[in-house]
Image (cartoon, rainbow, N blue to C red):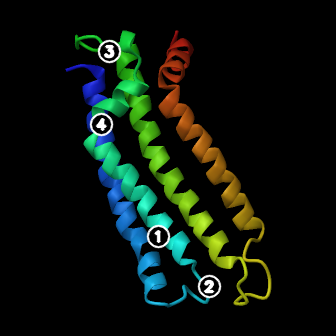
Amino acid sequence: MKPTHYFAVLIRLFAIALIVFTVRQSSVLVDALTGNDLQGYEVSLVFAWISVLCPLLVSLLLWFFPMTVAASIIRPELDNDFEPMGAASFLTVLVLAIGLYLIYFAISDTIYWLTLWQMSSGSNYLESSPFGAESKAAMFTTGIELVLASLFVFRARYVSALMLKLTR
């Protein structure tokens, strides 16, 4: 097996996790379709559909085309027939796995904050803004989480090379 095959398996596992997230997120859509509000917040029907359809479409694309995605991330010169894995290759795969794990939570946190922001705009439910210092700090850390997860996924080889330099 080539590294792209292993990464394709990880991509399919990520697609499964994204489907689980979509099922959890669909409660917002069900509430919007039934005309209910969420804890006093009005939910836009368009936003509810988008927050369910986007992760669903991404997970379906990842499920049906994992090799295409894996081949676009792993460079062709690294995709040789699989030999016993060296430390650099193994570390690159581990960094990619950690990156996919982190990006799952970063995406779900981002959707949470976008949903809360959308629901709170124009709502008379709360007298003051629901975004206090703690919420703003959590939004900032979600942004940092997205950046780090993207770094781990798209620059896995570079990150693993840095890690190997530290051990020498």
Local crowd size for mark 3, using a 10 Å CA cut-off: few (<14), some (14–19), many (≥20): some
Residue ID for mark 3 = 79
| Distance of label 3 from label 2 (alpha carbons) | 50 Å
Using residue 133 as the reference point, say whether residue 115 is left or right of it. left
Q: Earlier in the sequence, mark 4 or mark 2?
A: 2
Q: Earlier in the sequence, mark 2 or mark 1?
A: 2
x%, y% of residue 70? 35, 29
Q: Quadrant of residue 138?
A: bottom right
What amino acid type should be assigned to the residue bearing mark 2?
A: Tyr
Which secondary structure, mark 2? loop
Q: Measuring 68% from the left and 78% from the top, which residue is drawn there?
A: 120
Residue ID for mark 2 = 41
Residue ID for mark 4 = 66
Give the residue furthest to the front. 46
Give the residue furthest to the left. 1
What amino acid type should be assigned to the residue bearing mark 4?
A: Pro
Mark 4 vs mark 1: give the one in front: 1
Local crowd size for mark 1, using a 10 Å CA cut-off: few (<14), some (14–19), many (≥20): some
Q: Measuring 40% from the left and 26% from the top, which residue is drawn there?
A: 72
Q: Measuring 53% from the left and 51% from the top, which residue is drawn there?
A: 106
What amino acid type should be assigned to the residue bearing mark 1?
A: Trp
Using residue 140 as the reference point, say whether residue 107 is left or right of it. left
Q: Earlier in the sequence, mark 3 or mark 2?
A: 2
| Distance of label 3 from label 4 (alpha carbons) | 15 Å
Which secondary structure, mark 3? loop
Residue ID for mark 1 = 49
